[in-house]
Image (tube, helix red, strand yellow):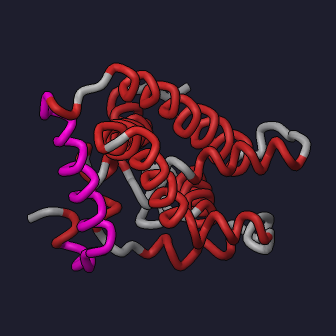
Amino acid sequence: MTIATQEKLQYNWKHVISLAGLHIGALFALLPSNFNWTAVGLTVFMHWITGGLGITLGWHRMLTHRSFQTPKFVEYFLAFCGALACQGGIIDWVGLHRLHHTHSDQNALDPHNAQKGFWWSHIGWMLYKGPAHAEIARCTKDISSDPFYQFLQNYFLPMQIVFGVLLYLAAGWPFVVWVIFVRLVLVYHCTWFVNSATHKFGYRT
């Protein structure tokens, strides 16, 4: 019996369907007709922009941990780059990650508690509705009232759709497959390995 079954968690079907759809979409990159070196290069570049500058530097170090400060326009730019990684709303992301550090590998308020196993901490936790979500508002009072962050919270998906349409109109379907589907899947798993692999194989100071 799995942890999820024991706790009688309910599936978050929106996440289940969207994650499955993105991974299926990325498989179209295996078709020779969809291979394009320019698309691959743009994918690598956008991986750095959205995953590196956006998620790692912007959402994680700058907003979640407040490790550094920048002029507001730089802060908003990094936050926007992170929104293009399509990892959910920025307020939810920051709140859940703050809860993770507050309750790291201890209890259900760590949304991806590594004590529940590699699969759970990597992706399983996103497939269910967990108790940590009820605590997000309490942990994000510093950003939740900001209109720009509210916009990114509510419209990250339409932004991705617009980006995909522009890619299709400018360069065709292979660019949509690589720069949208493949990039998102790669950025997702790079982020998730921080939750899973580093907690399983890392060390404590």
**Quadrant location, the N terminus:** bottom left
Residue at the spot 30% in from the left edge and 52% down from the top edge: 123
Please name whichever residue, 57 or 181, is drawn nearer the observer in this view of the structure.
Answer: 181
Image-based side of 69 in relation to 130, left or right: right
Please name whichever residue, 139 or 12, is drawn nearer the observer in this view of the structure.
Answer: 12
- The magenta stretch spans residue 15: yes
**Quadrant location, the C terminus:** top right
For the image, the number of numbered tags is 0
92 versus 114 height, above or below: below
Residue at the spot 78% in from the left edge and 71% down from the top edge: 147
- The magenta stretch spans residue 56: no
Q: Position of residue 65 (x, y in %)?
A: 71, 46
153 versus 175 height, above or below: below
Q: What is the span of residues highlighted in magenta in the rendered image?
A: 6-32
Q: Position of residue 135 (x, y in %)?
A: 58, 74
Q: Position of residue 69 (x, y in %)?
A: 86, 40
Image-based side of 175 in relation to 155, left or right: left
- Tell me which corner region of the image, top left, top right, bottom left or bottom right, holds residue 156: bottom right
Q: Is residue 103 visible?
A: no
103 versus 189 height, above or below: below
Please name whichever residue, 6 or 38, is drawn nearer the observer in this view of the structure.
Answer: 38
Magenta span main SS: helix
Image-based side of 2 in relation to 199, left or right: left
Q: Residue furthest left?
A: 1
Residue at the spot 24% in from the left edge and 67% down from the top edge: 17
